Amino acid sequence: MIKRPTDGNRHRIGIPYMNQEMTAILANVEADLGDHALAQSVYFSPTALTHIKRLIDQGGSIITDTTLVANDIDKSLLGAKGAQVRCFIDDPQVDSLAEQRRVTRAEIAVDYGLTTPGLKLMVVGSAPAAINRLIARRQHEPMSDVCVLAAPSGFASVVQLKERLLDSDLTSIIVRGKKGGIPATISIVNAILREISKGN
């Protein structure tokens, strides 16, 4: 029987992937929110920042699960190559399909988001069902054009969903544990965009 690593050991998964850019991003998030514990709980996949840089350079899409996040992302940091912020949660077709299928709007909005051409950053700040849907979709199709930023706050079920995302092969940035929420999500996205814009 293979012994699973403890949570303490698993947290160290992120350590080899910390670089100067990631350290600067987390310092910005901590300064913005005044929350050292939250900044310390952010995990980056090794290729997450590279994915987001390519997304901006190729005019891809940042797709959020709530208009609150979409509205507060600093669009001036997206550059001049056509990158956009999109949110499908209030689309009438999303609402209608969710009602027909008896699922959440967040799940249908994920499906809509995944049909968007080009590279995508799927930002989940408040809807755990969106994380679940992304994991489910990955089990049946390649998603090399997707990076997921998962930062909803909550207790056991939300924590477990974020850990399932961590255990998947999806490129991701995850606020692990109970921490997160909409202000944290906005802060992380803007800190990433600010750091990337320095190099452009």
Image (spheres, rainbow, N blue to C red):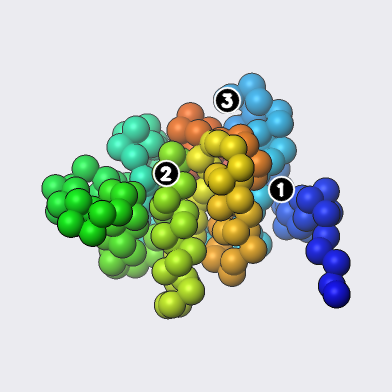
Residue 101 sits above or below residue 80 on the image: below
Which residue position is annotated with label 1? 20
Residue drawn at point x = 57 percent, y = 25 percent: 32
Report which quarter residue 119 is drawn in: bottom left
Please name the residue shown 26% across and 54% down the image: 102
Label 1 to label 2: alpha-carbon separation: 30 Å
Mark 3 neighbour density, 10 Å: few (under 14) some (14–19) many (20 or more)? some
Residue at mark 2: 127
Identified at 79% across, 50% down, the residue is 7
Amino acid under label 2? Answer: Ala
Q: Position of residue 154 (x, y in %)?
A: 55, 36
For disc 2, the neighbor class at 10 Å (few under 14, some 14 to 19, many from 20) is many
| Rendered location of residue 129, percent (x, y) | 42, 51
* Residue receiving disc 3: 32
Q: Nearer the viewer, mark 3 or mark 1?
A: 3
Three-letter residue code for mark 1: Gln
- Residue found at x 59% / y 69%: 169
Q: Is residue 100 left or right of residue 118?
A: left
Quarter of the image where the N terminus is located: bottom right
Q: Where is residue 43 in the image (x, y as percent from the top left)?
A: 66, 50
Q: Check if mark 1's residue and mark 2's residue have beta carbons within 8 Å.
A: no
